[in-house]
Amino acid sequence: MANEHTEQIRIVQETVAGKEITFAHVMGSPDPIIYQKLGLDPHVDYRSAAIGIMNMTPPESAVIASDIAVKSGNVYLGFADRFTGTLIITGVISDVMSAMNEIVDYFRDSLGYVTCDVTKR
């Protein structure tokens, strides 16, 4: 019986703990297909006029950001992932913009995060 030797590749993934919001964008009047592809409930979300998406590190920050978002206005929490740091909120464009700005301001001013600007299209 021949002894087969196979090479194995070892991949080491590493994240560097930083305190930053790397992406914050608001999509005004998105097409219904975007709601569907994101897995958002069209019965709840379709009436809404905007989707806000944000990414942050450390990823657990998404929990704090989601709390700020729902307390800052009439927005619906579409998705919050404490493993990737992604947050998606929906609502009327003024409420989504307000929530996104509240999050960025709090993380920058109170928690000392490096933040990006909230962009809108």
Image (cartoon, rainbow, N blue to C red):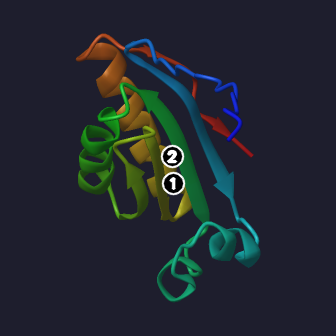
What amino acid type should be assigned to the residue bearing mark 2? Met
In the rendered image, residue 4, in percent from the top left (x then y), is placed at: 70, 33
> What's the mark number on residue 94?
1
Give the quadrant of residue 42: bottom right
Q: Residue at x 35, y 64 (%)?
A: 74
Extreme residue toward the front, this view: 1
Badge 2 crowding class, 10 Å Cα cut-off, few under 14, some 14 to 19, many 20 or more, is: many
Vertical position of residue 59 compared to residue 41: above or below: above
Task: Check disc 1 and report its element: helix, strand or loop.
Answer: helix
Q: CA distance from mark 1 to mark 2?
A: 5 Å
In the rendered image, residue 78, in percent from the top left (x then y), is placed at: 44, 64
On the picture, is 110 further left or further right than 50?
left
Extreme residue toward the bottom, this view: 43
Vertical position of residue 97 compared to residue 24: above or below: below
Q: Residue at x 52, y 89 (%)?
A: 43
What amino acid type should be assigned to the residue bearing mark 1? Ser
Vertical position of residue 70 compared to residue 115: above or below: below
On the picture, is 110 further left or further right than 121?
left
Residues at circles 1 and 2 in contact by the CB criterion of under 8 Å: yes
Q: Which residue is mark 2?
A: 97
Q: Residue at x 30, y 35 (%)?
A: 60
Badge 1 crowding class, 10 Å Cα cut-off, few under 14, some 14 to 19, many 20 or more, is: some
